[in-house]
Image (cartoon, rainbow, N blue to C red):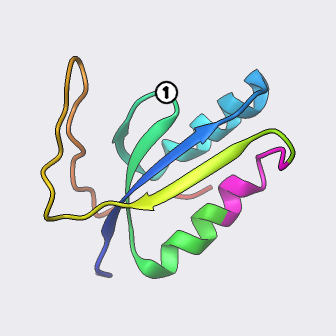
Amino acid sequence: MPDRQLYLVAWDVTDDRRRQLLREHAVLFAAGGQYSAYECWMAAGERNPVCSHLSALLDEDSDCLLVLRLDPRWPVICLGAAVPPARDDVMLVS
């Protein structure tokens, strides 16, 4: 099993249809998240294909996507109804 790292995948998408498509695709490999930010466990070889797949759904003139590797030494702080990410060794990408 490849060594996976935790990433935060977040976006700001202006169009409702594109935003829904992005959310539907992101939840396929997410360990948890909110409406436009998901925690995703990815190996180095998985990150680029996932980013390419999500990037193809964006309008490059008005949308943005952020993929940020999270430092595993820092604790995850969840406030309100937020749920900490669950480690998931299975990743599905359509």
The answer to whether residue 91 of the structure is visible from this angle is: no
Q: Is residue 60 above or below residue 93?
A: above
Of residue 8 and residue 44, the one placed in the foreground of this image is: 8
Q: Is residue 45 left or right of residue 49?
A: left
In the picture, measured across the screen, residue 52 lies left or right of residue 39, that is right
- Neighbour tally class for label 1: few under 14, some 14-19, many 20 plus, Cα within 10 Å: few
Q: Image quadrant of residue 14?
A: top right
Element carrying mark 1:
loop
Tag 1 residue: 35
Residue range of the region highlighted in magenta in the rendering: 52-60
Q: Is residue 22 visible?
A: yes
Quarter of the image holding residue 17?
Answer: top right
In the displayed structure, would residue 60 be above or below residue 51? above
Where is residue 18? Give x, y as percent: 76, 33
Q: Nearer the viewer, residue 19 or 76?
A: 76
Q: Position of residue 7 (x, y in %)?
A: 39, 58
| Residue lying at 78% horizontally and 55% vertically, measured from the top left | 56
Q: Please state, as top left, top right, bottom left or bottom right, where the C terminus lies in the image.
A: bottom right
Amino acid carrying mark 1 in the image: Tyr
Seen at 13% across and 64% down, the residue is 73
Residue at (40%, 75%) from the top-left corner? Answer: 43
Query: Which residue is depicted at the point 68% across and 31% down?
Result: 19
> Does 48 sit left or right of 8 as displayed?
right
Instruction: Say which quarter of the image contains residue 51.
Output: bottom right
Q: Nearer the viewer, residue 4 or 75?
A: 75
Q: Position of residue 25 (x, y in %)?
A: 60, 45
